[in-house]
Amino acid sequence: MERATDDGDLRLLVLGLDAGCRPVLEPLFESGVMPTVRRLFDGGTSGPLESQIPPWTASAWPSLYTGKNPGKHGVYDFLSFDGYDWDVVNSTYVRERAIWELLSDHGHSSVVVNLPVTHPPREFDGALIPGLTAPEEPACHPEGILAEVEQACGDYRVYPRSGPEPDRSLESYERTLADRGAAFRYLCDRFEPDFGFLQFQLTDSVFHERPGDRRAIEAVYSEVDRQIADTIAETDPENVLVVSDHGMGTVDGHEFRINEFLRERGYVSARSGGDGMPNWSTAWENDLLEGEEASERDQGPLERAMNVAATVGLTTQRVAAALDLIGLKEPIGTRVPNDVLRAASEQVDFPNSRAYVRSKSELGVRINLEGREPNGQVPRAEYDRVRAELVDELSAVETPAGEAMFETVVPRETVFQGPHVDEAPDVVTVPTDFDNAIAADLEKDRFGEPMEPWNHKRTGVVAAAGPAFDESVPLTDASIFDVAPTICSVFDVAVDAAMDGEPLPIVDGSSTTEYPAYDADAITATDDAAVEDRLSDLGYL
């Protein structure tokens, strides 16, 4: 297909700041940490960007780059379930076309780097190096391009990892971010794209891995700003759009152990011994261990103490976090066997429960429905009644402070629309202001302190600068679903009528058309322990 433009200009550069939001950015602007990004905000137009439910990376970025809600694209979480089995999502779980594929169909080439849930890539005009949920050394598009990038730019890493610099060190963060920018700039020079999308994941990860560490946060955002400055200087984009998938902030309320609540009301059955599915602490345990030898040793005093601790609600997540904070994670971890910790903890017995939370990131309760789940316990004739009961009971939950735990508890059809609604939790539970959190673990106490002191908020940010945008128009009510239609409009490509957003008022909106059904690839398993470990490290599993 002929290129729609042949002058080598990058018409639109989209910069993705995972978790970017005003409460995080403003202090960095004021302290001079992000001068380049501040100029984009001050010189163009900007405003809040409302995320979706759930406002988590693996679901929100596909919503942004397809313009469609999870009920249409099919990804609700970092995990996807088939009965009681699960897998980490990848691009084959996204059942709608990405914006760069739509642009390719209209003769526009693209370079995409580090965008989550884009592995394995599909064919399109341009190049793609995937981001979060991809394995290290992932398949890229075109085939062999990663080796070419590494030959030109040096080693490329999808995730910060041990090497010349310590893992999770500021040097490791900065090197990983530099990889992003160098790879993107090389590919832009190599392919001369019309559209570019460069995403930075560590702007989110640093809050999960080093919560409240101002030095680390400033180091990450400063390096991001440096990479953006170099990228703008070298690619000279006509227009720049800054977007985020959600916001970030402190979690000052309570953690609600929702499966424990459901067990008290007779919905959840539990079992011990490591046979409950899935065991959410498995990846944490693996992260605490080095090799298989740990599981083969006899129990010592530490193992016996951990065994007792688990019976009173001290989970492996909390153990791992506590040990990490005091610098004992590795020496302790090499002596704590997987099997001991698993056998000591209770897990949800999914097949024999009536309703449960499968994953905390889904933000909802799944009913074990007869004829839908393999061992469904709730007859279809009772579905509406059971779901209504769950909505009523969860809506009434109050925190120990006497405040509403949830701001919204509704049937899934209230939030999601599309052919994949059946894959969503049956009841959607949205914590109040996201200042409360939910956990899927079974513990003795229904409420506790949040495991993660920083976590996602609903409101992100958007900023636009360049001649394609009317910079005098304020952005006041932008949605994550508006980004893809806006990109279409910059390229004068008809907006897919099935998209859930509208072009932002800063552009002249394109016409709308109905596109043929998306010819999605067959779903393939991720099945990568390193990816699961990474997600567990970040607190998503």
Image (cartoon, rainbow, N blue to C red):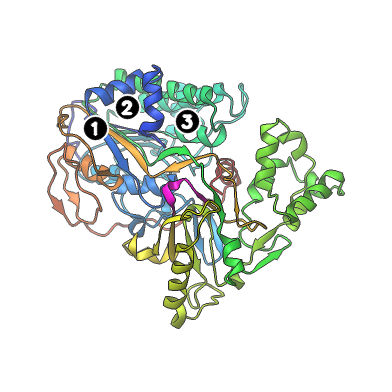
Q: Which residue is disc 3 drawn over? A: 147
Q: Is residue 402 magenta?
A: no
Asked if residue 151 shows in the view, the reply is: no
The amino acid type, in three-letter code, at marker 2 is Cys
Q: Quadrant of residue 39?
A: top left
Amino acid type at mark 3? Ala
Residue 75, quarter of picture: bottom left
Q: Name the amino acid type tagged 1.
A: Asp
Residue 188, label in figure: 2
* Image x and y of residue 292, in percent: 76, 46
The image's mark for residue 194 is 1
Instruction: Determine the CA span between mark 3 and mark 1.
Output: 23 Å
Instruction: Please report whichever mark, 3 or 1, sits nearer to the chain's N-terminal start.
Output: 3
Q: Please give left or right for residue 209 compared with residue 512 in the image.
A: right
Left or right of 7: which side holds 118?
A: right
Q: Position of residue 184 (x, y in %)?
A: 37, 28
Look at the image and tell me in which quarter the N terminus lies. Answer: top left
Q: CA distance from mark 2 to mark 1?
A: 9 Å
Question: Residue 472 appears at what percent x and percent y?
Answer: 15, 30
At a point 61% along the width and 56% down the height, the residue shown is: 441
Query: How many numbered marks appear?
Result: 3
- Tell me if residue 198 comes above or below residue 298 in the rendering: above
* Location of residue 35 in the rendering, given as x and y in whole percent from the top left corner: 34, 18
Q: Secondary structure at mark 3?
A: helix
Q: Nearer the viewer, residue 129 or 489?
A: 489
Please state which of the two labelled residues, at mark 3 or mark 1, is closer to the viewer. 1
Residue found at x 41% / y 76%: 384
Q: Residues within 10 Å of mark 1 (few under 14, many from 20)?
A: many
- Tell me where the magenta segment starts and ends, as one range: 431-437
**Label 1 element class:** loop
Circle 2 SS class: helix
Judging depth in this view, the residue of 266 and 504 nearest the camera is: 266
